Image (cartoon, helix red, strand yellow):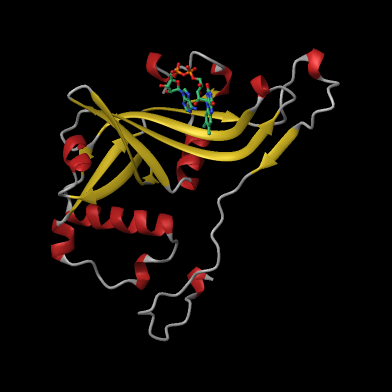
Amino acid sequence: MQTPRTTPSRLAKRAHYDAETIHPILDEALFCTVSFAVDGQPMAIPTALARQGDKVYIHGSVGSHFIREIEKGGPVCITVMLTDALVLAKSAFHHSVNYRSVVIFANAEKVTDETERMNVLALITDHLIPGRWDDLRPTTDSEMRKTTVLSFSLAEASAKVRTGPPSDDPEDEDLPTWAGIIPMQTVRLAPIPADNNTGTLLPDYLQ
Ligand SMILES: Cc1cc2nc3c(=O)[nH]c(=O)nc-3n(C[C@H](O)[C@H](O)[C@H](O)COP(=O)(O)OP(=O)(O)OC[C@H]3O[C@@H](n4cnc5c(N)ncnc54)[C@H](O)[C@@H]3O)c2cc1C
C-alpha cells in the first residue's frame, strides 16, 4: 500500500505496491533484515523469512533479545533485497545495481495457535530447503516451547525494481570505457555430507 512512508523521495517510478510484484521478491529471498528501535537505538537483525498469503513470518528463540523486543508489537521495518546485476556506466556517478527489493512497515503479531506455529515452521524450513520438512523427525513439544513465531502484515509494503543497462550522460556516450552489466545470481552448490551422515544417500529433493 502506498503511504507517505512507503513513497521513495527519489525515482518513485521504480516503486511498486502490488502483490504481483512484492510476493515473488519475498518468495525468492531466503533472508530479510528486521529493523527496530530500542530506547532510540536503531537495531537491524538478519534472519530467515517465509511468506504465505499477505503475511511474512519469522521465527527465533524465546530467549533472543531481538525476538523479545519485537514481539512487544512496536513498529518494525523489514527489508529484503535481491541483486540481479552490477551496472557499470562510463562514469562512477552512473554506476548502479539491478535489484528487486521490498520494504515492509508492520508490527509483529505473535502466532500462538500450536497448529499454525507448526505450519509456519514447516513453511520456513521448506522455503529454505524445499522438501526438507517431511524428511525430518517430528518437532518435539520442548522444541516448540523454545521457539517464538511472529507474523507481519504486508499491508504497508513497497517494492523497488531496477532493470536494464546503464544510463550514461550524453557527453559520455563515446568514451572508450567499457559499460554494461555484470549479472549476479545466488546459487546452491553441491551438498557436502556431514560426518554423522551414516550412509544415507542424498535424497532426491536435494539433488
Ligand atoms: C542492492 C541495492 C543497492 C543500492 N545501492 C544504492 C546506493 O549505493 N545509493 C543509493 O542512494 N541508493 C541505493 N539503492 C537504492 C536505495 O534502496 C533507495 O531506493 C534510494 O537510495 C532512494 O531512496 P529514497 O531517499 O528515495 O528513499 P526514502 O524516501 O528514504 O524511502 C521512502 C520509502 O520508499 C520505499 N523505498 C525506498 N527505497 C526502497 C527500496 N530500495 N525498496 C523498496 N522500497 C523502497 C520505502 O517504503 C521507504 O520507506 C540500492 C538499492 C539496492 C536494493
Query: Which residue is most to the bottom?
Result: 199
x, y percentage for residue 197? 39, 80
Residue 137's image quarter?
Answer: bottom left
Question: Residue 137, relative to residue 201: is it above or below?
Answer: above
Where residue 77 sits in the image (x, y, percent)? 33, 29
Residue at the location (36% across, 58% down)? 125
Q: Quadrant of the C terminus?
A: bottom right
Q: Residue at x 61, y 32 (%)?
A: 97
Locate the N terminus and report the quarter of the image it occupies.
Answer: top left
Where residue 2 sits in the image (x, y, percent)?
43, 19
> Residue at 48% of width from left, 77% of height from top?
202
Please say if 186 is above or below 68. Answer: below
Picture residue at 35% right of the left edge, 65% below the top: 133
Examine the rendered structure and indicate whether residue 114 appears above or below residue 34.
below
In this image, 165 relative to 112: left or right? right
Q: Is residue 4 above or below residue 189?
A: above
Q: For residue 86, what is the image quadrant?
A: top right
How many callouts does the rendering have?
Answer: 0
At which x and y percent is residue 155? 36, 29
On screen, residue 205 versus residue 174, left or right, reads left
Relative to 196, is 130 on the left or the right? right
